[in-house]
Image (cartoon, rainbow, N blue to C red):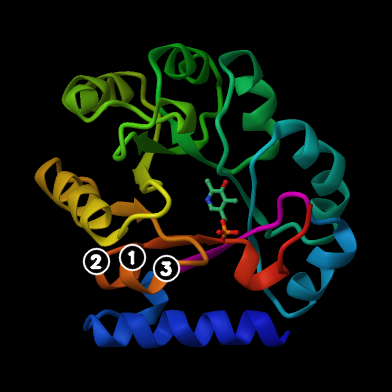
Amino acid sequence: MEELDQVKEKIARAARRAGRDPQDVTLVAVSKRHDVDAIRPLLDAGHRDFGENRVQEAQEKWPALKAEFPDVRLHMVGQLQSNKAADAAEIFDVIHSLDRNSLLKELAKLDTKPACYIQLDVGEEEQKGGLPLSQLVAFHAKVKDAAIPLAGLMAMPPQGVEASPFFALTAELARRHGIAGLSMGMSGDYEEAIMLGATVVRIGTALFGTRN
Ligand SMILES: *Cc1c(COP(=O)(O)O)cnc(C)c1O
């Protein structure tokens, strides 16, 4: 699949430029608002990490695909309401948007807790969700106490401004707190994110085009 090959090549180039192993960067193909027909070519090409931002949409699209491709890993990249935590944990393997105590409490109750990224509100934009930076230390401790597997930090810089300082800040916070994973970088800025240490990039438009 041409778009997939192009994105993977750019990821590899950015990683090598940063002196990193391209294998250390996971591409999550964000398939929100795209139907199964658009997703299938990526599956056929061997791609296995996909992202969705709504629980209901994932429930509609993915059970059948997961039955067919059991090694798919599904990533929740959207804001998650606490009352949907259990449903989300059933279908998603990884949650990139753990950002509140209420959500943490619901996830803590589950027998099988999904791996989670703590989403940081790096741009101080409440509508995007994310934990205020000042709360990271206390929240990180609570995640540990709740035995929720921590995959890393996630950040979504504000639109319309240079993203790199926000990526650098997120990477610095992860380093300071001994957190390994960094979910950062989207279609418009993933190469910069990789230069600054991203271990996961979440890419929709560059793979699927724009729709809706
Ligand atoms: C939609 C979305 C993406 C992908 O964005 P593109 O710019 O289309 O690559 C990544 N992360 C999150 C949280 C999203 O909602």
How far apart are labels 1 and 2 at the CA level? Answer: 5 Å
> Residue 135, position in %: x, y?
22, 22
Residue drawn at (41%, 66%), measured in percent from left and top? Answer: 189
State the image quarter where residue 208 is shown: bottom right
The residue range painted magenta reads: 26-33
Element on which disc 1 rests: helix
Residue drawn at (30%, 60%), measured in percent from left and top? Answer: 162
Residue identifier under label 3: 190
Q: Residues within 10 Å of mark 3 (few under 14, many from 20)?
A: many
State the image quarter where residue 7 is shown: bottom right
Kindly give the residue lying farthest to the front in the view shown. Answer: 160
Q: Residues within 10 Å of mark 1 (few under 14, many from 20)?
A: many
Closer to the camera in the image, 160 or 157: 160
Where is 65 relative to 104, above or below? below
Kindly give the residue lying farthest to the left in the view shown. Answer: 176
Q: Are the two marked residues, 1 and 2, in contact with CB atoms closer than 8 angstroms?
A: yes
Closer to the camera in the image, 18 or 24: 18
How far apart are labels 3 and 2 at the CA level? Answer: 10 Å
> Residue 116, position in %: x, y?
44, 37
Residue identifier under label 1: 193
Label at residue 196: 2
Q: Are the two marked residues, 1 and 3, in contact with CB atoms closer than 8 angstroms?
A: yes
Residue drawn at (10%, 45%), measured in percent from left and top? Answer: 176
Closer to the camera in the image, 26 or 37: 37
> Residue 29, position in %: x, y?
62, 62
Give the residue type that dot 3 points to: Tyr
Which of the image's four quarters has the N terminus?
bottom right
Question: Does the residue tagged 3 have its C-beta within 8 Å of any atom of ligand 1?
Answer: yes
Residue drawn at (73%, 80%), measured in percent from left and top? Answer: 45
